[in-house]
């Protein structure tokens, strides 16, 4: 088995990071299903500015630092629901060894690792498809929930879904926007919803911003939703949305 030190994931970052949380809500139960951890800079700078500082030399350290900071912050603010952590598929050297620090951190701060969801975005081109499938299966074996983020937008898509069925699929924001008035988007969504149902996968509508988008997905049976309609990300704070 490769040693974790081979990928330099323990090399400290030369910049500080913090975490914001945005709720994923269960619109049927009127409760928070999870909070997604979103990276921010030392002074609250946005994710784009922070990720712009990531390169080949600090990729592994950044991915590990985000995991650790997410769990530590979630424990500190007494997060009242699951914690969803984004991971970078090309920052995994070996699934078991790269997961070890996550498990150690969760144990150290007394955060139940069964409450952690790992999600991968389609935005990043996956360099090793087989390794990503192995990563997902390893996470599942250790009791973590798994999710594919931005489904329908990027590189992974149906090829990944054919080899691994996650617990959750987060629909791409571009599909969400204005779907209540767009028959083409509605038809595409209908196909995805049917596949998800047959595979036992729960859908999340991410990026919901209007009452009409919220109502469309609620009527369509998508009970998990996330977006500015409910709450914006809050720095180091587990915000509870006000129900409308």
Image (spheres, grey):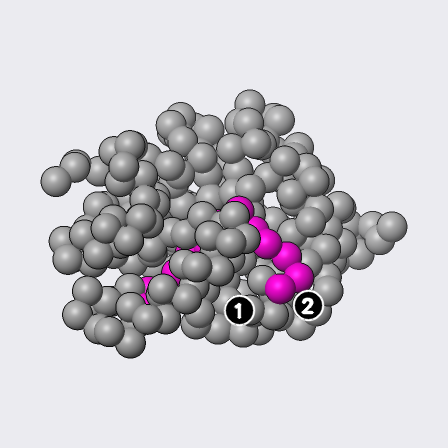
Residue 228: horizontal and vertical position, in percent?
22, 53
Q: Is residue 165 magenta?
A: yes
Category of crowding for the residue at label 2, using alpha-carbon neighbours closer than 10 angstroms: few (below 14), some (14–19), many (at least 20) = some
Residue 41 lies in quadrant: bottom left
- For the record, the magenta segment spans 162-175
Residue 116: horizontal and vertical position, in percent?
53, 38
Category of crowding for the residue at label 1, using alpha-carbon neighbours closer than 10 angstroms: few (below 14), some (14–19), many (at least 20) = some
Residue visible at 73% across and 51% down in the picture: 95
Residue visible at 55% across and 27% down in the picture: 112
Residue visible at 38% across and 27% down in the picture: 80
Q: Is residue 33 above or below residue 86?
A: above
Residue 94: horizontal and vertical position, in percent?
76, 54
User: Nearer the viewer's eye, disc 2 or disc 1?
Assistant: 1
Residue visible at 45% across and 35% down in the picture: 82
Q: Is residue 102 visible?
A: yes
Q: Relative to residue 191, is residue 9 drawn left or right?
A: right
> Any mark on residue 157, and which?
1
- Residue to which mark 2 is pinned: 129
Instruction: Compute the Cα span from label 2 to label 1.
Output: 11 Å
């Amino acid at each position: 088995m490769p040693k974790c030190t081979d990928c330099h994931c323990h090399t400290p970052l030369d910049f500080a990071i913090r975490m914001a949380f945005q709720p994923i809500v269960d619109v049927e139960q009127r409760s928070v299903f999870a909070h997604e951890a979103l990276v921010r800079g030392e002074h609250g700078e946005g994710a784009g500015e922070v990720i712009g500082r990531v390169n080949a030399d600090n990729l592994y350290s950044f991915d590990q630092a985000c995991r650790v900071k997410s769990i530590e912050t979630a424990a500190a603010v007494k997060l009242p629901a699951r914690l969803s952590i984004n991971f970078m598929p090309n920052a995994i050297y070996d699934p078991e060894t790269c997961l070890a620090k996550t498990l150690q951190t969760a144990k150290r701060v007394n955060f139940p690792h069964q409450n952690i969801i790992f999600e991968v975005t389609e935005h990043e081109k996956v360099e090793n498809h087989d390794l990503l499938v192995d990563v997902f299966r390893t996470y599942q074996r250790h009791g973590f929930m798994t999710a594919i983020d931005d489904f329908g937008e990027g590189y992974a898509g149906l090829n990944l879904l054919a080899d691994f069925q996650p617990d959750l699929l987060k629909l791409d924001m571009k599909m969400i926007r204005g779907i209540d008035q767009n028959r083409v988007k509605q038809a595409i969504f209908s196909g995805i919803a049917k596949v998800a149902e047959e595979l036992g996968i729960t859908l999340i509508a991410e990026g919901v911003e209007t009452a009409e988008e919220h109502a469309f997905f609620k009527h369509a049976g998508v009970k998990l939703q996330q977006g500015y309609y409910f709450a914006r990300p809050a720095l180091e704070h587990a915000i509870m949305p006000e129900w409308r």
